[in-house]
Each structure stands twice: as C-alpha cells, then as structure tokens.
Amino acid sequence: MNPESSPAGQPDVLVVGGGIGGLSTAYALARQGLRVRVLERAAEFGEVGAGLQIAPNCTRILAEYGLLEEAKSLGVVPENMVMRDALDSRELTRLDLRDLERRYGFPYMVIHRSDLHGIFLRACERAGVELLNDRTVVGYENIEGGARIVLEDGRVETAPLVIAADGLHSVARRQLIDDDVVSSSYVAYRAAVPIEQARDNGIAEQDVTVYVGPRCHFVQYALRGGDMFNQVAVFESPKALADEEDWGTPDELDAAFEATCDTVRKGIPLMWRDRWWRMFDRDPIETWVHGRVALLGDAAHPPLQYMAQGAIMAIEDGWVLARHYAQLAEAAPAGTELDWDAALAVYEAVRVEHCHRVQTTARAWGELWHLDGESRLQRNAIMRARDTYDYSFTDWVYGPTALTPDEEPPMFTPIPLASAVVEDAGDEPLTVAGSGTR
C-alpha cells in the first residue's frame, strides 16, 4: 500500500539505507515511540567486511540502548592497543585499554561488522521498526510538512522526516550537494580467518596491533571471543598514482609489504584476494539538513578509516537526533506537532563540527602513519616519548558524545615532527633528545 494515499500507514520517519547507521538511527528513534520505516535497496539486510573497532564513545551508547552485553558476547574486549613500526616491529606507543575503560567508563571493544549490524537489526525488529528490502530510492523532494522519496519503480513515499543514511555514494548527497568522492590512492585488503591459521605468525591475541610503515600499514586483532583473527592490510597503489583504472590489485599488495617485518609478511598470504576496498572520503561540508531531508553517517561525513570512527559517528548521529527529539517532545505542549526543524537544527549544529574534526584528523593520521625516511624516524621518536597513560590525544573523541556545541571538548595540540631530534642509538630504539622518553 502506498503510504501517500493512506495517511494511517505513513511513518513518522523514513530512513533510507539499512546499514549500521540507518538501523541504529531507526532504533534510536523507535525507542522514542516514533513509527520508523527503513528502506534498503539490497534483497536482504546484511553487512560485508570484517572487523570493527568500537571505542568508548560508542560502547557508552550501546550500554544506554541495552545492547552492550550482547555486543561483548559476540566480540572481544582487548587488553591493549599497540602501535609498532612495520619495518623493524619495534613498539612505538600503546594504550592500556583496561585503564582506558576506567577513564571513560565504558570498554574499547572489537566486533565483526556483520555481528554489530545483526545486533541493531534484531533490536529494530523488537522495537517494531518496519524493515523493507528491494527499495531503491532515486530522488528526494521537500513538501509541505515533510519530505518525499521517489523509488526506482516510480512509487512515492512521504514522511515528516526523511533520513538519508545511504552511504559514501549517497543518492541524496549527489542530489543535494553534488560533490565528488576523494580518492586517497590507498586500498585495503581484509581477512577474518580461524585464529589457528595465524597463531604461528607471532601475533598478539589479546591486543589490537597496528604496524605503521612507509606507504602501508597492517592491523591485527581477534574477533568472536578469540576464535577468529582479523587482519587489514592497507597500502598506497602505484597504479592509482599513475591514474590507471585497475588499481589496488594483489600484485601491488605483495609488493607493498615486501620490506616489512616477519609478523606482517606472514600475515599477508592470509588476506582475501578476490576483493579489496579502495579508500575514499569526501571533503567536509557544513550543511547536512535540507528542509526535511537530513544526511546521516557516511552520506554526511565519510571518513578515511584511520580513526576507526566511521560506524561510530553514524551511531552517534542517530543517538544525538533521537535525544533532541525526546527533549523537544517532552517540552512541547500536549497535542502539538513536534518542531522537526528545531530538532534538525540542533543536530546539525553539533554534529557537523565534531565529524569535521574526525574527517580532517583521519586524513592527517593517515599521512603520519605512512611516513618514510627522516620523517618516519621523527614520528617514531615522538610516539616513543608519549606516556602510555597520556589521554590528551583521545579525550576529544572517546569522551561522552556532545549534544550541543558548547559540550564539544577542545581538540588535542599536535606535536610538530620538526620538534623531534632523532638520535641514532645503534640497536637501541630512537629517542627524542631531552624529551624524557622511557
């Protein structure tokens, strides 16, 4: 039945996109008593990929939703996050994740992407969210009192609010902003394999380990209670830099990691070679809300992956929007319609700035990871100088999600590479002169 011709069947909110961002937002709004309909273009709801890192700013929200214990039962709560040099394997810096949990009140965990998606899918089903597949949205239009979407088959649906959570290649973003994706020229290979296949490779089963190297990095951590091992291999593609169409191929994968340490080289043969993910983002934009159509998640702020905040930001978006809806609904006189425009204005006011910070920091972090030559040595020296329990670089992102701009914490202060004085200590780790390195 077409909701436009049947007001009784019209939802309060239409969510376009059934990924983690769309489902988590649908659940957040359904918890507030709203009728929510999710339109997903695929024949089934599901996620592809492998592992996700979920920082305390997200596990805090999962706990509020009553979903954290289920997530912990399906994932892993690691002990440390350790960064190493990909060439010589030496430790550069670490986070004690148990102490991190004490600081922020919620754990840092890792989980398979499909497991987190499944948690939100089941939560939506329990909350009465209407979940529809095979619905490809091709257009958006604002109307009196709301917005409507046009489906590929010509049908039209309307609601007081339409949320476009349709990802990096968002139809809504193309229609409303019409900007281009930005290629980083980097590509990611992934693998999630039974842990027995990796145990003899010198892995750290209880840690998240990141090996950073010239124009490449390699990430490892356990999943699904420690039974599965996740790896991500990322490298700059010479073919992409040469503007070749077929870039990021397996031969480039092998060449990119030839000079790395034993643990990394032993992990490369385990990578899936029949698919790879080219790494794109978009330049930050200031306007996500266009009338009653709101961009959310990667449609609004697709980041590069270096901050491990992409899925988290989408979950935060939905939480913030639902919280502002609840506050306005509570304050509204009985029997009056909610001022969705006010809710969208405060959503945009706080989320744009935060996600802008994450997007630009992710780009800078990627550059830092992939340095070579003298710059690599300077980076290593600065990282080794950091105290394990210094949280000045994480407080701005791992703390409670801001609901208003004044709640957004100050950014960290970057340390210039040029401030590092590299001393060659023979076989000893390089240090920064006068820095008090341990």
Image: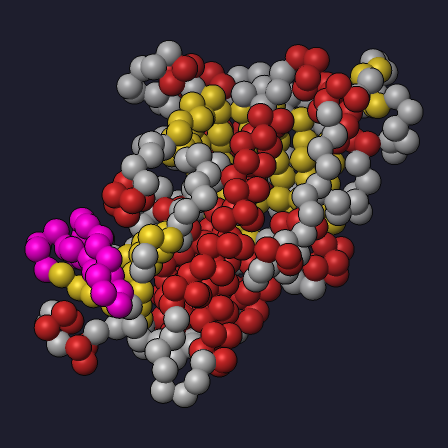
Q: Which residue is drawn at 28% across and 19% down?
A: 245
The answer to which of 230 and 315 lies nearer the viewer is 315
The answer to which of 74 and 135 lies nearer the viewer is 135
> Can you give x and y, in whole percent of width and height, for residue 208 in the image?
62, 44
Q: Does the magenta stretch include residue 218?
A: no
Total numbered circles: 0
Most extreme residue toward the left is 154
For residue 225, which quarter of the picture?
A: bottom right
Quadrant where the image shows the N terminus:
bottom left
> Can you give x and y, in whole percent of width and height, for residue 418 in the image?
75, 19
In the displayed structure, does residue 383 sit left or right of residue 326? right
Of helix, strand and loop, which mostly describes the magenta segment? strand
> Can you give x and y, in whole percent of width and height, for residue 411 in the image?
68, 43
Residue 306 visible here: no
For residue 427, which quarter of the picture?
A: top right
Quadrant where the image shows the C terminus:
top right
The answer to which of 188 and 337 lies nearer the viewer is 337
For residue 107, which quarter of the picture?
A: bottom right
Q: Residue at x 56, y 48 (%)?
A: 354
In the image, is residue 400 above or below residue 220? below
Magenta segment range? Answer: 130-155
In the image, is residue 274 above or below residue 401? above
Q: Which residue is drawn at 21% across and 61% down?
A: 143
> Can you give x and y, in whole percent of width and height, for residue 13 in the image?
31, 68
Most extreme residue toward the bottom is 334
Residue 386 visible here: yes
Q: Does the magenta stretch include residue 134?
A: yes
Q: Residue at x 59, y 64 (%)?
A: 60
